[in-house]
Amino acid sequence: MSDTRRKIMRVLDGESLSPPPLWLMRQAGRYLPEYREIRAKAGSFLDLCYTPDYAVEVTLQPIRRYGFDAAILFSDILVIPDAMKRNVRFTEGHGPEMDPIDEAGIGRLNGEEVVDYLQPVLETVRRLRHELPTETTLLGFCGAPWTVATYMIAGHGTPDQAPARLFAYKHPRAFEHLLMLLADVSADYLVAQIDAGADAVQIFDSWAGVLGEREFEAFAIRPVARMIASVKSQRPHARIIAFAKGAGYQLKHYRQKTGADAIGLDWSVPLAFAAELQKDGPVQGNLDPMRVVAGGRALEEGIDDILQHLGQGPLIFNLGHGITPQADPEHVRLLVDRVRGGQVTSGK
């Protein structure tokens, strides 16, 4: 009797599938002309995130085109500080900006109304579960406390997150309070996404790679472990992917220390090391997004290497970070076909 569970959920439970299921980070995005059309209608980026009609449509677009095994909710990690009244805005050419927070501001933060504020996002999740194909996994997500905190401290993205690192050294109590508050609020937000219909959720720690050993333990592991414990205490069957970009060797005990069901790997993780990590459970990744831009032999070799090293174990095929706006949609189709062994994908 065949297993009718969604493929990605089977891998998250430890199964090895051949070919492996796949989805791509930022698969709904600027590389698709149909996304750019909706983005132009929406007004601001946050309006796109908070308008279910638009957010549902752009989430579905790559599923229609490529038949990915998962759809990931279209939203942003910074909806959490936006819900905490930090005046988040997205400026074309400058990326996200918000009012930088100081020690006194951290003391005034209140997370009680965050989930209520984000009801439009949860409505998007509910509608997606209804509209997606039955076999497609629906992924919710949020940012990890460290990564979200870096934007809150600096007020914008920085190359090495020096403002947040300096703040953490100078004001350790306030910084720990911020991380734990973000952990608790984010856990409740993930539970709300699961209740709205998400099959599994991913925690993005996009800036984990700038942390030293002691800081990684305190800022990347401890808050994420607190989040995952909270989510699983409320929803024991929840499945959680944790993605600590740039963490390198510090991934060795990341799964065990955080309680994540699967760990996402960026493209800098050596495949031999990835195979060691896979012995402890599912891994996700880790194709360099630039290979999708390049196409041709570079794309084929990158895919084949991952399948050769990780394809016999529990693997969710993905990129090592988000797909870039420069990616050719036809290269994405070639990626899907090669991972699936030459199958013809449905779609346009």
Image (spheres, rainbow, N blue to C red):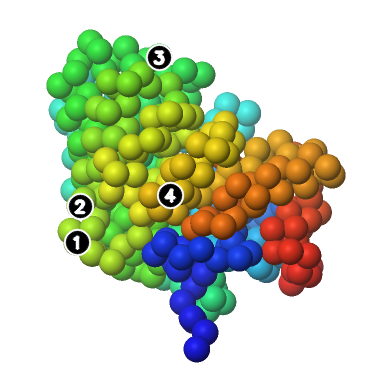
At a point 28% along the width and 48% down the height, the residue shown is 259
User: Which residue of the protein is positioned furthest toward the bottom in this rendering?
Assistant: 1
In front of the other: label 4 or label 3? 4
Give the vertical position of 196 relative to 147 (above or below).
below
In which image quadrant can residue 178 be found? top left
- Distance from disc 4 to disc 3, alpha carbons, whole Å, reads 35 Å
In which image quadrant can residue 209 be found? top left
Q: Label 1 amino acid?
A: Gln
> SS of the residue at dot 1?
helix
To which residue does mark 2 refer?
A: 230
To which residue does mark 1 refer?
A: 234
To which residue does mark 4 refer?
A: 279
- Distance from disc 2 to disc 3, alpha carbons, whole Å, reads 30 Å
- Distance from disc 1 to disc 2, alpha carbons, whole Å, reads 6 Å
Q: Which of the two labelled residues, at mark 1 and mark 3, occupies the earlier sequence position?
A: 3
Q: Label 2 amino acid?
A: Ser
Q: Which of the two labelled residues, at mark 2 and mark 3, occupies the earlier sequence position?
A: 3
- Distance from disc 1 to disc 4, alpha carbons, whole Å, reads 28 Å
Where is residue 271? Give x, y as percent: 57, 39
Q: Which of the two labelled residues, at mark 4 and mark 3, occupies the earlier sequence position?
A: 3
At a point 46% along the width and 48% down the height, the residue shown is 278
Few, some or many residues within 10 Å of mark 1 (<14, 14–19, 20+): few
> SS of the residue at dot 3?
helix
Q: Is residue 310 left or right of residue 260?
A: right
